[in-house]
């Protein structure tokens, strides 16, 4: 399709919206005949390259973005980095994300960015003007761009269906092109459902899917025979439905975090929620207050703050302590409400039967201990005599 | 029933005028102090931006004074940034501590909307009163801004005492005056009084513009009195953004300056939140005006200003103007702050004298 002999190479950094819209971008550019190159998975050298070029107030996802762009810079003709402004009416992405192409342009010299606006606040205007912009930049026929975009949207929808069934990003990406993809997906989901404990990992999509930033939390949980769901699983309408009564927060990513935590707090199959947030993310800081107020302590929540200085051992300790706590909660016959101040139903029941609710399993243990101590005291007093 | 609204610097003078016109009792909160910050930090989430912590602290102090209703601005555009979530988050945090109050969300400066919201508390409120109140408040804000600028000029040319006398005198006049016609005449009278003081030699004095986050620039306690510090060092300083910007009025820079707007879009294509594009706009504006340096001041974890902070180095090299970056939070020390400002002023002083020397030759 291209005029010149060599198809242009377009690089996609493996961070930020790669984890949400990679299939769309991939299909769109390959349909146009371009070659798509994706940067390496985030690793130590990515982060180091980012740290050397960025200012220290930036949050880790943006520092990582520097590294990815530096990796791609000399390998491709264009680095694809759009201005992602909003995903639905009245909610916006974080300022750093909206301005990320400008930040990259100002700090990395000689980088050829391919960027256009993605603004769902006024979708049609932005999509048409954006695609025309791409057409002029790559010197292509605009009609071809529109058909390619249509195909790409279909491809993305197929991918989203797998994600909404409960597949993780990597799993969905591996089966999306195979013919019996549905069968494989069902197989994965069936084997996952057999697992005894279910934990939801909540956070921004580029945090929970980037194994290096979140210290491989999903793999760590899976190794311990735990079914992992993520906040990506929910569709936009499910998120909106669960925050309908509260009013949407200002941030698109924040409303997904809030919506999914409320949605899963009502789900009986879910045992706990792990919330991963980058250090210094002030949009998440206020969202945490929303979550605390609306989840009413129905589910145990572990908040993990990550940055380039956190260590693997610290993460493991905290995750293991959290899992132990969940295990103990499951083993007690009566489930203790974490905070019965909010839970009126359990309060009524407890007054009705005149039972005090406490962990049954631990009751005999303490008695044994008391007996042992008494005997020891006796022995010691006898020997003293 | 007692009301309270966010206060920034001397903004209470404007908001009180509005409250008097529409007939509600608005409590004037004290200026933020160490207690305000420590209460705010105690209850606020760790990574929330510094203005949120300070405003939360002052709202808790307001509750102790018997305030029952908070008026919270809340807009639904990209420019709202964190402010859109302030009201709800504060409500959740304070409800946890068992405090009870009502919140009025002002979504825009829509007059009929304001009338509707306040009618519950004061049935006599009319559209005319609200319009008058807003006009008086806006005029008072711009008068305050002019006064601040004159105060800084007198501070540099004469002494601190004279400047303070001048300011205190006029603040009282502005505060008491409620007639809109007279308020519009006041500016001329203020300038007439100002001409009695010796003027500063604009050619040789060092000129610095302080740009950045609107709250940090306009709240003297939070920015460690940066303007007075600069005056002490005999530097003529100007605000990159004043509170008028919040009321929809912009002094100094013409908002329809198309050339400047296009120049800004080269650096930051979209307004990413708050006054991010305006910060770059004022940086370019003052660089072109021949200022000797810029100070970029912003709270730690302020997202729009951090975005801008990462773009400003490019502006700095393109326009050949030094910039000092000062992030601020509850742990900013007085000594460290003044050391950095003094060193920066020394540096641009040397730079200026070198430039003068080479041009004279």
Image (cartoon, grey):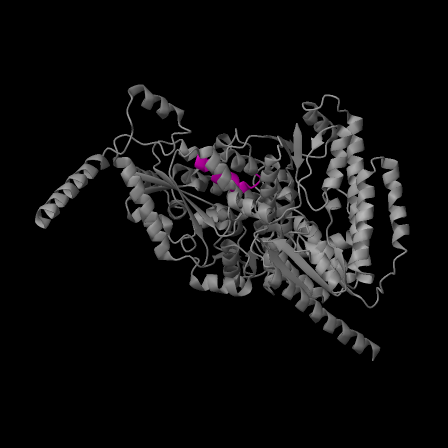
Asked if B203 appears above or below B39 in the picture, the reply is: below
Instruction: Say whether residue A154 is visible.
Output: no
Q: Nearer the viewer, residue A147 or A338?
A: A338
Residue A342 rendering spot, x and y as whole percentages: 42, 29
Residue A252 within the segment the image draws in magenta: yes
Residue A164 x, y percent position in the rendering: 42, 37
Name the residue at 74% across, 36% down: B16
Front residue of B131/A175: it is B131
Question: Taken as a whole, is the magenta stretch helix, strand or loop?
Answer: helix
Residue in view at x 80 percent, y 77 percent: B357
Query: Can the viewer see residue B290 in this picture?
Result: yes
Residue lying at 76% horizontally and 54% vertically, measured from the top left: B260
Q: Position of residue B180 (x, y in %)?
A: 85, 36
Horizontal relation, residue B273 to residue A157: left or right: right
In front here: B145 or A290? B145
- Quick check: B268 left or right of B157? left
Question: What's the residue at 51%, 63% (across, down)?
Answer: A51
Q: Which residues are magenta?
A: A249-262
The answer to which quarter of the image holds residue B134 is top right
Membership of A182 in magenta stretch: no
Residue B185 image offset from top left, x and y in percent:
89, 42
Q: How many marks?
A: 0
């Amino acid at each position: 399709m291209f005029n010149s002999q060599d198809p242009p190479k377009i690089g996609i950094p493996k961070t930020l919206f790669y984890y949400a819209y990679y299939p769309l971008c991939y299909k769109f550019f390959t349909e146009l005949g371009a070659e798509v190159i994706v940067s390496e998975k985030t690793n130590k050298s990515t982060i180091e390259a980012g740290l050397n070029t960025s200012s220290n107030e930036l949050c880790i996802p943006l520092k990582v973005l520097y590294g990815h762009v530096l990796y791609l810079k000399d390998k491709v003709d264009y680095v694809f980095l759009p201005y992602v402004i909003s995903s639905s009416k009245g909610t916006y992405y974080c300022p750093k994300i909206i301005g990320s192409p400008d930040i990259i342009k100002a700090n990395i010299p000689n980088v050829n960015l391919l960027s256009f606006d993605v603004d769902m606040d006024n979708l049609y205007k932005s999509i048409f003007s954006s695609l025309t912009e791409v057409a002029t930049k790559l010197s292509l026929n605009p009609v071809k761009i529109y058909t390619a975009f249509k195909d790409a949207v279909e491809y993305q929808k197929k991918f989203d269906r797998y994600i909404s069934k409960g597949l993780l990003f990597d799993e969905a990406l591996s089966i999306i092109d195979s013919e019996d993809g549905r069968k494989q997906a069902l197989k994965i989901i069936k084997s996952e459902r057999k697992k005894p404990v279910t934990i939801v990992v909540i956070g921004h999509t580029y945090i929970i899917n980037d194994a290096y930033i979140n210290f491989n939390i999903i793999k760590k949980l899976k190794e311990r025979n735990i079914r992992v769901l993520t906040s990506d699983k929910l569709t936009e309408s499910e998120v909106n439905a669960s925050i309908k009564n509260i009013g949407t927060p200002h941030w698109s990513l924040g409303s997904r975090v809030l919506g999914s935590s409320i949605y899963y707090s009502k789900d009986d199959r879910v045992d706990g929620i792990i919330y991963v947030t980058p250090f210094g993310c002030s949009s998440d800081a206020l969202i945490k207050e929303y979550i605390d107020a609306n989840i009413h302590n129905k589910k145990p929540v572990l908040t993990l703050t990550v940055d380039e200085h956190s260590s693997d051992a610290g993460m493991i300790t905290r995750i293991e302590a959290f899992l132990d706590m969940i295990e103990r909660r499951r083993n007690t016959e009566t489930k203790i409400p974490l905070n019965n101040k909010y839970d009126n139903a359990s309060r009524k029941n407890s007054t009705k039967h005149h039972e005090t609710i406490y962990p049954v399993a631990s009751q005999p243990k303490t008695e044994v201990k008391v007996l042992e101590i008494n005997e020891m005291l006796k022995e010691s007093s006898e020997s003293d005599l | 029933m007692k009301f309270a609204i966010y206060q920034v610097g001397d903004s209470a003078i404007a908001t009180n005028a509005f409250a008097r016109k529409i007939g509600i009792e608005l409590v004037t909160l004290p200026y933020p102090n160490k207690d305000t910050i420590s209460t705010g930090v105690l209850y606020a989430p760790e990574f929330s931006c510094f203005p949120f912590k300070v405003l939360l602290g002052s709202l808790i102090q307001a509750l102790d004074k018997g305030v029952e209703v908070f008026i919270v601005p809340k807009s639904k555009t990209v420019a709202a940034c964190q402010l859109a979530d302030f009201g709800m988050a504060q409500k959740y945090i304070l409800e946890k501590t068992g405090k009870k109050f009502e919140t009025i969300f002002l979504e825009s400066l829509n007059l009929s909307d304001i009338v509707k919201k306040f009618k519950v508390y004061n049935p006599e409120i009319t559209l005319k009163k609200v319009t008058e109140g807003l006009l008086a408040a806006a005029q008072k804000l711009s008068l305050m801004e002019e006064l601040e600028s004159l105060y800084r000029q007198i501070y540099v040319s004469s002494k601190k005492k004279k400047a303070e006398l001048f300011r205190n005198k006029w603040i009282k006049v502005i505060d008491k005056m409620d007639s809109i016609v007279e308020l519009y005449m006041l500016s001329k009278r203020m300038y007439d009084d100002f001409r009695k003081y010796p003027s500063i030699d604009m050619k040789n004095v060092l000129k610095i513009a302080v740009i950045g986050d609107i709250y940090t620039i306009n709240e003297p306690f939070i920015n460690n009195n940066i303007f007075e510090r600069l005056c002490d060092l005999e530097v003529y300083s100007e605000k990159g953004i004043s509170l008028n910007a919040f009321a929809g009025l912009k002094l100094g820079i013409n908002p329809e300056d198309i050339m400047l707007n296009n120049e800004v879009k080269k650096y930051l294509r979209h307004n990413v939140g708050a006054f991010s594009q305006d910060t770059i706009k004022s940086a370019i504006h003052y660089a072109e005006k021949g200022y000797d340096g810029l100070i970029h001041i912003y709270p730690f974890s302020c997202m729009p200003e951090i975005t801008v902070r990462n773009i400003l180095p490019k502006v700095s090299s393109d326009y050949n103007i030094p910039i000092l970056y000062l992030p601020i939070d509850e742990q900013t020390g007085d000594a460290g702050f003044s050391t950095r400002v003094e060193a920066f002023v020394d540096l641009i002083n040397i730079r200026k004298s070198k430039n003068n020397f080479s041009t004279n030759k």
